[in-house]
Image: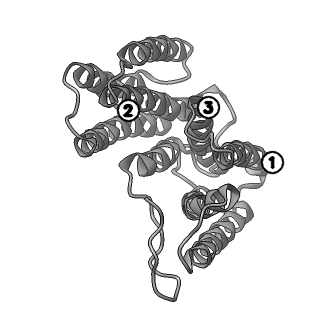
Amino acid sequence: MGPKSRGPGPGPPPLPGEHGAWAILVIPLALGLAAAGGPDGAAGGPSAAALLLVPALTFLFLSRYAALPAAVRLLEGKPVPPGFLGRRLFWTAAYLGVSLACLFAALSSTPSGAYAATLWIAGATALLGAAQTVLAFAGRGRTLGGELLGMAGLASAAPLVIVASGGPVDARTLGAGLAALGYFVSSLAFVRAWRARARGRTGAGACIAAHLVLAVALAVLWKRGIIPAGALAAFVPVFARTAWGLGYPPPTIRTLGWREVVVAAAFTGMAAATLLGRAGGE
């Protein structure tokens, strides 16, 4: 369905309507804030810089959401209703302006010892996001590689928040991002299997294989001390959802969406509580 024609003015702000879009934004930020240490590297909670990164990344995410439909239609030469491009340009600029202001404030308040590392990780996050956006412009944003690339970029928000609080650039900081990415991979595999079944195809085999690989990867990460046992336990409802969903698939996309909300909330709560306790114990 194409964009609707509206009256003059910018109209209401465009916001994602899919539960999954908000989950992949919120989960890494929540895990990063839970694991963040204080400005001196102690477990004193997230710094002002880390807190400012939350709106910076949120509005950057929204600016991409606002811009992408208009940019893709222009590149494909598709017609658009009068005023649609102007409204999308307005909201893209508004979102991006707020994002850049928050990012500048975050970098200005980043602890001096963490400034270089924060810049490096922020650059990696921006590079991953830009690469996925290029794929989206080329019509390949929904491919497996395109979606994984975008998810990796969003997952990198967790270590970015930790480092901006003065946390070390080490394996455990990376582990917070890998835990978020692990959840994303599970969700992507399950949703793809559900969609394949809805189209009369079978996707269960690929979904099961993805979860077997994920289970092995999580075990290795735990064994090496990169993720704590509590974060490993947070994947229990994630794997349970997959087993239940493959045996008894959700009847509608709406049911699927709400199930994912419950699983995402359970995973985030358990993983964040573990990371918060881990930071507090150091």
Question: Residue at 37% of width from left, 27% of height from top?
Answer: 196
The quadrant in which residue 64 appears is bottom right
Residue 182, position as x, y percentages in the image: 48, 28
Q: Residue furthest right?
A: 116
Judge depth for marks 3 and 2 and give the one in front: 2
In the picture of the structure, the residue carrying the numbered disc 1 is 116
Q: Secondary structure at mark 2?
A: helix
Mark 1 or mark 3, earlier in chain? 1
Label 1 or label 2, whichever lies nearer to me, is 2
Q: Nearer the viewer, residue 167 or 72?
A: 72
Query: Is residue 37 among what the camera can see?
Result: yes
Which colour scheme appears in the figure?
one colour
Image position of 99 (left or right of 203): right
Q: CA distance from mark 1 to mark 3?
A: 17 Å
Q: Which residue is mark 2?
A: 191
Q: Helix, strand, or loop for circle 3?
A: helix
User: Who is closer to the viewer here, 80 or 33?
Assistant: 80
Please report whichever mark, 3 or 2, sits nearer to the chain's N-terminal start: 3
Residue 174 marker: 3
* Kind of residue at disc 3: Leu
- Amino acid type at mark 1: Ala
Q: Earlier in the sequence, mark 1 or mark 2?
A: 1
Estimate how packed mark 2 is, as few (under 14), some (14 to 19) or many (20 or more) residues with alpha carbons within 10 Å: many
Three-letter amino acid code at the position of disc 2? Val
**Disc 1 on helix, strand or loop?**
helix
